[in-house]
Image (cartoon, rainbow, N blue to C red):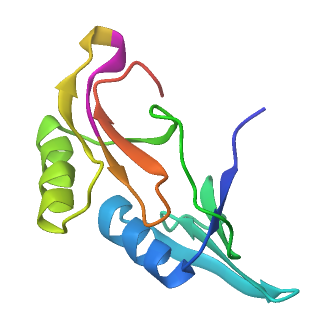
Amino acid sequence: MKCTHVALQVRDIDASIGFYRRYCDMQVVHEREEEGIRVAWLGWGEDPPKFVIVLLQKEYPTNTQPPWQHLGISVDSRDEVDAAHAKSQADGISGAWPPAEGGPVVGYFCGVPDPDGNVVEFSFGQRIG
């Protein structure tokens, strides 16, 4: 088995696409509208994609996430973790987790909430993959 996608319901799909482009270097690899719901798949450019984040635009009540719920993205250096956090601060995003060292298994990480409050964790040195 392998994980192929994570689907997230979003209020403003264009804002979410912009976030995942800016912070995760993802691009739209598929887009459609189905029964009045706009759908976009974001990937890293492989054809066919190995993994995508599926965004589904449909209004919903306020989203309050548990404090440690997140999506994990591996980066190539501590500098990239720091850069993601600095970018979130420059963009005025509240609720970001500052960079922290979590030890040899967790690695160095920070977290940045997307427009719907879903946190994306950027990590370097985790023992995954």
Q: Relative to 25, is 58 above or below?
A: below
Q: Position of residue 98 (x, y in %)?
A: 19, 38
- In the rendered image, residue 59 lying in the magenta stretch gets the answer no
Tally the marks.
Answer: 0
Q: Residue at x 68, y 52 (%)?
A: 5
Q: Relative to 22, is 72 above or below?
A: above
62 left or right of 119 in image: right
| Residue 49 seen by the camera | no
Q: Relative to 38, is 24 above or below?
A: above
| Residue 40 seen by the camera | yes
Closer to the camera in the image, 45 or 73: 73
Q: Quadrant of residue 93?
A: bottom left
Q: Position of residue 13 (x, y in %)?
A: 56, 79
Q: Which residues are magenta?
A: 105-110
Q: Quadrant of residue 35?
A: bottom right
Q: Position of residue 97 (x, y in %)?
A: 26, 39
Q: Position of residue 129 (x, y in %)?
A: 48, 28
Q: Residue at x 40, y 18 (%)?
A: 127
